[in-house]
Image (spheres, helix red, strand yellow):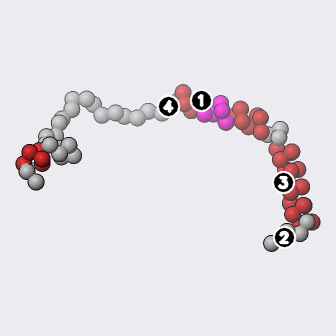
Amino acid sequence: MSDSAESEDPSLVRKAYRTVTPGYRGREDVEMNLIGWSLFLGLVVLLVPLLPFLIVVWLVGKVLDAVVPSEE
């Protein structure tokens, strides 16, 4: 391999650069937390009234599995 091929390799770093930019310190994202909680509470309001119907469907499925023999 020639010297010119080695010097053109983009994966090798020739010089380390220093920065004057201060480091980033993370902060809590209150806005996104509010959106997340709003979506969660909206889903709870929609799904809690459906919970009795889901339980009935689940129970009917369990009863049918117990009564009707499976063909295994």
Between residues 69 and 35, which one lies in front from this camera angle?
Answer: 69
> Closer to the N terminus: mark 3 or mark 1?
1
Residue 72 in magenta stretch: no
Q: Position of residue 10 (x, y in %)?
A: 20, 43
- Closest to the camera, between mark 3 and mark 1, is 3
- Identified by mark 1, the residue type is Leu
Between residues 13 and 40, which one lies in front from this camera angle?
Answer: 13
For label 4, the residue is 29
Tell me whether circle 3 and circle 1 mark residues in contact (CB < 8 Å): no
Residues in magenta, as a range: 36-40
Cα distance in 3D space between marks 2 and 3: 21 Å
Badge 4: residue crowd in 10 Å (few <14, some 14–19, many ≥20): few
Badge 1: residue crowd in 10 Å (few <14, some 14–19, many ≥20): few
Would residue 24 appear left or right of 65 to someone viewing this image? left
Cα distance in 3D space between marks 3 and 1: 34 Å
Please identify the quarter of the rendering in which residue 58 is found: bottom right
Which residue is farthest left? 3
Residue 38 in magenta stretch: yes
Cα distance in 3D space between marks 2 and 4: 54 Å
- Closest to the camera, between mark 2 and mark 4, is 2
For label 3, the residue is 58
> Closer to the N terminus: mark 2 or mark 1?
1
Q: Label 1's element?
A: helix
- Identified by mark 4, the residue type is Asp
For label 2, the residue is 71
For label 1, the residue is 34
